[in-house]
Image (cartoon, rainbow, N blue to C red):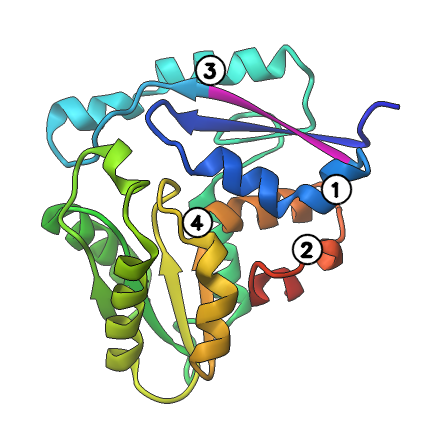
Amino acid sequence: MAPKVEFGMLVPSSNTSLEPLTTAILSPFLKTNAISVHFSRFTVTSISLKPDALSQFEFGPIVAAAKLLADAEVDIIDETGLKATTSVLGLNRLLGLLDVGKGRGPGLGFVTPYLDDVQAKILEVYGRAGLDIKAASHLGKTVNVEFARVGEDVLDGQMVDVVAKLGKGRKVVPTFCTNLRAAQRVEAWEAKYQGLVVLDTVATVVWNMLKITGVDCKEIEGWGKMFDL
């Protein structure tokens, strides 16, 4: 029997985290053949604000990768012109649901692996959108394949730092990079720190694809509070 819903995902070529984490999150649906997930790649080897790094995200190669997935007639592709989403669109939707930036909404912090200027640009963009980022941690890395090699102990340390700066009360912390192996730590972080919701950007795109295609998230357990929203 064919899957009821078929997901297509575009993956930076040097990303080794998104595919295994995505299939792990979706495993309840994959086991029953309710969903299948398919991947296509486009070249990305580093993340920075230098012209050669930014050129990796020009539309041509991304559209070419998307067309290969479109040949399979999948129901939704992240980052395309079919029914589409991205990890950041999913993140932004969740920030809205959690009332981040609204009156007495939760404090916002960010965890990333990026260089100083990339981190600053992310915070600037969200600041222009009216979101006051109270805390942030980054690692100063630029080579994309190295992001996946960041250990859980390092990520735990970043989360400790950001949560401490956010203080008591409700807190929302995105782990902002689809090549960080962070999604599997979300449940533990949320259990450890009272009032914390972690929005990992691998999980946010999965969450939004499920929402767009009308699939109930209740079967997903162990990947964080976002799947209860």
Q: Which residues are magenta?
A: 35-40
Q: What residue lies at 68% left-to-right and 23% top-to-bottom? A: 74
Q: What residue lies at 75% left-to-right and 55% top-to-bottom? A: 219
Q: What residue lies at 76% left-to-right and 38% top-to-bottom? A: 31
Q: What residue lies at 50% left-to-right and 76% top-to-bottom? A: 191
Is 9 on the left or on the right of 158, as rendered?
right
The amino acid type of the residue labelled 4 equals: Thr
Quadrant for residue 70, please give it.
Answer: top right
- Is residue 216 in sight in this rendering? yes
**Mark 1 closeness class: few <14, some 14–19, many ≥20 residues within 10 Å:** many
Secondary structure beneath dot 2 equals loop
102 to 95, vertically: above or below: below
Depth check: 159 or 153 in front? 153
Q: Which residue is mark 1?
A: 29
Give how far apart the Cα atoms at labels 2 and 4 are. 16 Å
Q: Which residue is mark 3?
A: 65
**Residue 49: mark:** none
Question: x, y percentage for residue 41?
Answer: 43, 20
The amino acid type of the residue labelled 1 equals: Phe
Q: Which residue is mark 4?
A: 201
Which of pointers 2 and 4 lies earlier in the amino acid sequence?
4
Give how far apart the Cα atoms at labels 4 and 1 are. 20 Å
Which of pointers 4 and 1 lies earlier in the amino acid sequence?
1
Which of pointers 4 and 3 lies earlier in the amino acid sequence?
3
Q: Residue furthest right?
A: 1
- Is residue 99 in sight in this rendering? no
Secondary structure beneath dot 1 equals helix
Question: x, y percentage for residue 42?
Answer: 38, 19
Q: Which residue is mark 2?
A: 220
Tell me, yes or no, whether the highlighted magenta stretch contains residue 145: no
Which of pointers 2 and 1 lies earlier in the amino acid sequence?
1
Secondary structure beneath dot 3 equals helix
